[in-house]
Amino acid sequence: MQKRYQYCMSGMFAATDQNHYEINIPSPHTYETEEEAMADGAFGYRFVLLPGGKGPQVVIFEGSGFRLVCDGKENYIKDWVEGDIVGIYDFDEFTKAGGYIRLLNPELGDNVCIIEDSDFLDTDKTFADIFPNMEHLKLYYIDNLAYSIDEITEGDKYMAKTEETLIIEDVLYQNLFGSNPCLAREYGTKEVTVTLLKEKKVKEIVDFLSYNAKKDEFRCYEIKVSMADFKSKAAKTWIGNYNYLVIPRELYLKQSLYEWKEQIPYYVGIIVVNVERRSKWVAKRPTPMEVSAGMKFIC
């Protein structure tokens, strides 16, 4: 079981849809040591629309730089990318590699000085959605703000299944409660036994269940941490108004988003959790469902 390390850049960009986004871009390379992975911190990133019909892509350059320019009238920063292209991601390749974007809440306006994690909204938009009317071969700026070094394991998982599940549950808790539980919009708990009122009473377990009392909405989360777990015959309890499959990043990368969609009901969303960074993103949004009288459940 061999551990590898991967540099992941976290930045911001302004899209042609007039919104601002956070983007997290994994390096196309992995390394034997964290020190080697840190060398990818020199990379520069741009969006570009290249010939070939694949739509907007993220292009990763070997280097980048900037300098302060004083022209006598005003001062400004000139930035550039340089060197060879070391990687290109279209949207499908980007998401399969574990990359994701989040929308900066448009309601914040243009005068935001300090941005917090809660200011971002999950989005299922593609690069084509956020870059309408993109000019061919023009480089669109991505601001490189932060980074992480992620540990990747080739072969078997390096983290015990039970520990991984606990972290995923904690990420779901934090999504509901944030830093102040008193301000939570909905409340949740894990491993809820429910009785389904169908033709006969059937008891099943929801891995994680949340409830929004104001909207009278239930959200059901089915947590799977391995492909064997996902493909087992155990019941998947998706009976809420919104339903999700929740999987770790390493499992998500084993197949394409299209393949994941083909293996779950159309109304089920997909949440991907980066266990090392304790963060998540929505790879597929759920379709709202009515909880009919025949499917009401009792906890």
Image: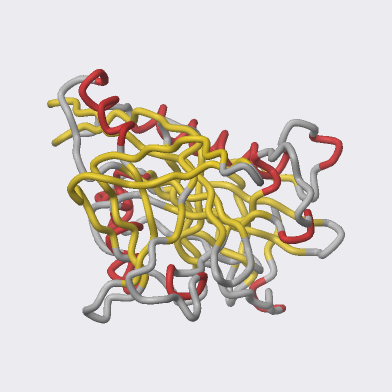
158 and 47: which one is in front?
47
Q: Looking at the image, which residue is at 43% across and 32% down?
A: 147
> From the viewer's perspective, is 295 left or right of 49?
right
Is 231 drawn above or below residue 184 in the view shown? below
Query: Is 284 positioned to the left or the right of 178 in the image?
Result: left
Q: Residue at x 66, y 68 (%)?
A: 241
In which quadrant of the rendered view does residue 135 lie?
bottom left
Instruction: Say if 159 sits above or below 294 in the image.
Output: above
| 110 left or right of 75 in image | right
225 versus 5 height, above or below: below
From this view, report whether residue 148 is shown above or below residue 46.
above
Residue 98 placed where, x, y %?
A: 35, 49
Please, which residue is most extreme toward the front here?
Answer: 72
Colour scheme in the image?
Answer: secondary structure
Q: Considering depth in this image, is 12 or 153 the residue closer to the camera? A: 12
Q: Residue at x 31, y 33 (%)?
A: 42
Residue drawn 46% across and 51% down?
142
The N terminus sits in image quarter: top left
In the image: residue 98, left or right of residue 18: left
Horizontal and vertical percent position of residue 209? 63, 50
The front one of 257 and 195 is: 257
Q: Position of residue 123 (x, y in %)?
A: 56, 62
Point out residue 282 in the picture as x, y percentages from the top left corner. Answer: 50, 57
Total residue callouts: 0
